[in-house]
Image (tube, coloured by chain):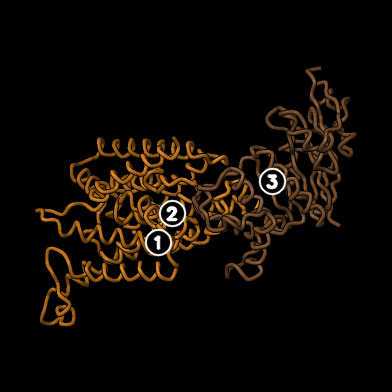
Amino acid sequence: MSLLSCSGLGVTIGSRAILSGVSLMIDVGKVTAIVGPNGAGKSTLLSCLAGLREPSAGSAMLDDAVLSGMKPRDRARRLAFLPQTPEIAWAVEARTLIELGRTPFVGARGQTEADRGAVDRAMKAANVEAFEHRIVDTLSGGERARVLIARALAGEPEWLLADEPLTGLDPAHQLDAADLFRGLADQGVGVVVTLHDLSMALRMSDRVIVLAEGGVLADDPPASALSPEVLRRAYGVEATLTQGPGGPLIDVVRRA
Amino acid sequence: MKPISRPLLYAGLIALLLVLSGVSLIAGKVWVPFSAWTQPDIDPRWAIVFELRLPRTILGIIVGAALGLSGSVLQGYTRNPLADPGVLGVSAMAALGAVLTLYYGVTAVAPWALPVAAISGALIGVGLLMLLSGTASSLVTFVLAGAILNILSSAGVSLALSLAPNPWAVNEIVDWLMGSLADRSFEEVKMALPFIIAGCGLLLTTGRALDALTLGETGARSLGVSMPVTRWSIAVGVGLAAGASVAVTGVIGFVGLVTPHLLRPLVGARPGALLVPSTLGGAVIVLAGDVLVRMTPAAGEVKLGVAMAALGAPFFLVLLLRLRRKIA
């Protein structure tokens, strides 16, 4: 079993402490959501856990290896990261873009049969086979988001860390993405996402970590992590947990 | 335009290169047919071929290859189709280095001073470019950093011209700045070739990193690409390749800009797949340009750098307009 963890993690940018004293242990096979108000350090924490940012204090570890000390290629083989505002610089075919997910595996001789197989499976999982040969510029926002998810899956990682993967998706595609993450977790992948939509966090995750003022305010199963008390302290709003027809909902009533 | 298969593209470019090399040996103010080549005792024109046109052709190929490859690597790295050693001020910095040696007249005593100074200038240029644009290498910071380098080096060149000790030095500097392959010998080939091979070799290793950079710097890092290694390879590679080119031919602009742009649709836009075609394509374009300037009906010869700029500037404008339409 793989374990992603951090202990005493702190990040200071300039003179501002973004995060301090964050200690977490995250298991594979679950969807873990990180929520919190703007500026709480969600993305910063995620990039530390992805090994892309070296913490100013403490450390982030993958099993017993310090992430910022790992060889980039070894880390990339085990852990995939989806940035918040993904950039696609050139007008390449969707398949070419997804093949980039094999970068940490491809040797000097180029792609092997195994690489092509992994790309095919990733395309199937993200449901993007229909536009394999379309140029990414011509895809809609939702289609492009799915292609980028397929890119992350092409490495068949143990861990998938996604920064705001639902932002910019319409409700139907949000549900598709949530189902996809759930399916991955059921197959044993460790999924860690940052989210803004609290109701989605409530529905799609096994565990919610609430960040506020640079530290962990709550870290529990969704219903207890997103209690009215926590939401008041984290966001400064009065909110109630209600039971909607499709599952639990968080109704934000007013500013506290 | 649809991407075409890689063997076909390579074969086409190599065939074009071979044909142009042949034309480059034959064509000019004096036409030398193949029949003259094999009879050195009877036909004196063979000397034109082997002592003037052969080094000129080889230089055209290696300088074009260096500029084409540098351009496609810089475009891949900056994710910006407007980047090339000229636009980003690297060639201008190399020229400044070379002009300083011409100004002080050290080239007469130490012929190696000029390429060393040009390569140092180029290396300082790329180094400053990386430093000025920082780790958050956005399009704007890169172009601004390039503009600063261009201004800095043209000021330096102007200063050297205005303070030049004698008209002869001014003449030499101006003549050299315009960029040309005329009257070069095997000395220049020997001078540039090792540096260009080393630089291009280094640049050709960056293909996979450039591919990954399609997803931006964060995306590339998450795929296990080491940005410091990539940055160093590009800085040293472009410094050596573009610096050595400027050292032997002066500034020949726009090759690095135009070549990748023309070939990009043929390789499906993947930056790594563009490197070898751009190397071949740069050689083709410089060779074609050089054959054309040799055949222009003028008393003297039009300088290759001038001709390339005359063709390249409108091209740059069209590129800019198209980019603007895309953004708007």
Q: Are marks 2 and 1 in contact (CB under 8 Å)?
A: yes
Q: Tell me where residue A105 sits by quadrant.
A: bottom right
How many callouts does the rendering have?
A: 3
Q: Which chain is orange?
A: B
Q: Residue B264 in the image: state x and y as whole percent.
A: 42, 55
Q: Which chain is brown?
A: A
Q: Which residue is mark 2?
A: B72
- The answer to whether dots 2 and 3 both sit on one chain is no
Q: Using residue A76 as the reference point, say whether residue B150 is left or right of it.
A: left
Chain letter of the residue carrying label 3:
A
Q: Residue B168 in the image: state x and y as whole percent.
A: 18, 46
Find the distance from the CA under tag 3 to the CA under tag 1.
Answer: 33 Å
Q: Which residue is mark 1?
A: B279
Secondary structure beneath dot 1 equals helix
Relative to residue B189, is residue B321 depicted above or below?
A: above
> Of residues B251 and B18, which is closer to you in this image?
B18
Instruction: Determine the residue positioned at 35% across, 66% down.
Output: B13
Crowdedness near tag 3: few (<14), some (14–19) or many (≥20) residues, C-alpha within 10 Å: many
- Residue A165 visible from this viewpoint: no
> Of residues A119 and A212, which is closer to you in this image?
A119
Q: Using residue B196 as the reference point, say whether residue A232 is left or right of it.
A: right
Give, as a three-letter code, the residue at label 3.
Leu
Q: Residue A253 in the image: state x and y as whole percent.
A: 80, 20
Instruction: Determine the residue positioned at 42% across, 64% down.
Output: B4
Q: Using residue B323 as the reference point, say whether residue A11 is left or right of it.
A: right
